[in-house]
Amino acid sequence: MEKLMNVLLHEKPVKMILGIRNNGGSSYTTRIAKYADCTYSHTMKIVDFLEEKGLIQSEKQGRTRYIKLTNIGEEVADLLDELVRILRKIDERKE
């Protein structure tokens, strides 16, 4: 659990999960990498980890790897979205 918390509390994985969610719950690896401003290889490493933990599932079609959130991944995305919203409110108060 500690490793999962460590991953989910970093900017890139959060952007990836929210990027998948904002794309209708499904996307492909290259698009996720662009959304998170991350290299393809780093994206793949995070995607593999998130899939291992059951937050996403992937399916390869030809050379493209399609990724979608699982039910638990949707729940995590909702919580992360709420956390980001709250943190933005806090940040706005400082200005």
Image: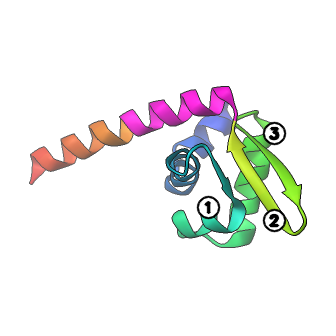
Residue 57, x across and y down, in percent: 78, 41
Which numbered mark, 3 or 2, is in the foreground of this view?
A: 2
Name of the residue lying farthest toward the right: 62
Q: Residue at x 71, y 62 (%)?
A: 29
Cα–Cα gap, marks 2 and 1: 12 Å
Query: Looking at numbered disc 3 in the image, what kind of residue is underneath it?
Result: Glu
**Residue type, numbered disc 1:** Ile
Residue closer to the observer: 60 or 50: 60
Question: Which residue sits at x=36%, y=42%?
Answer: 84
From the image, which quarter does the C terminus lie in? bottom left
Q: Amino acid at mark 2?
A: Thr
User: Which residue is nearer to you in this view: 40 or 67?
Assistant: 67
Depicted 72 relative to depicted 10: above or below: above
Q: Could you tell me residue 80's position as x and y percent? A: 46, 37
Give the mark, 2 or 1, whose residue is nearer the N terminus: 1
Q: Position of residue 6 (x, y in %)?
A: 60, 42
Q: Which label sits in the foreground, 1 or 3?
A: 1
**Badge 1 local density, few (<14 within 10 Å), some, or many (20+)?**
many
84 falls in the magenta region: no
- Name the front one of labels 2 and 1: 2
Q: Which residue is mark 2?
A: 64
* Residue 47 vertical placement versus 63 (above, below): above
Precedes in sequence: disc 3 or disc 2: 3
Q: Residues within 10 Å of mark 3 (few under 14, many from 20)?
A: few
Q: Secondary structure at mark 2?
A: strand
Describe the element under mark 3 as helix, strand or loop: helix
The residue tagged 3 is: 52
What residue is rendered at 52% in x and 43% in y?
9
x and y, in percent, of residue 25 in the image: 60, 43
**Label 1, on which residue?**
32
Distance, label 1 to label 3, CA atoms, is 18 Å
Count of marks placed on residues? 3
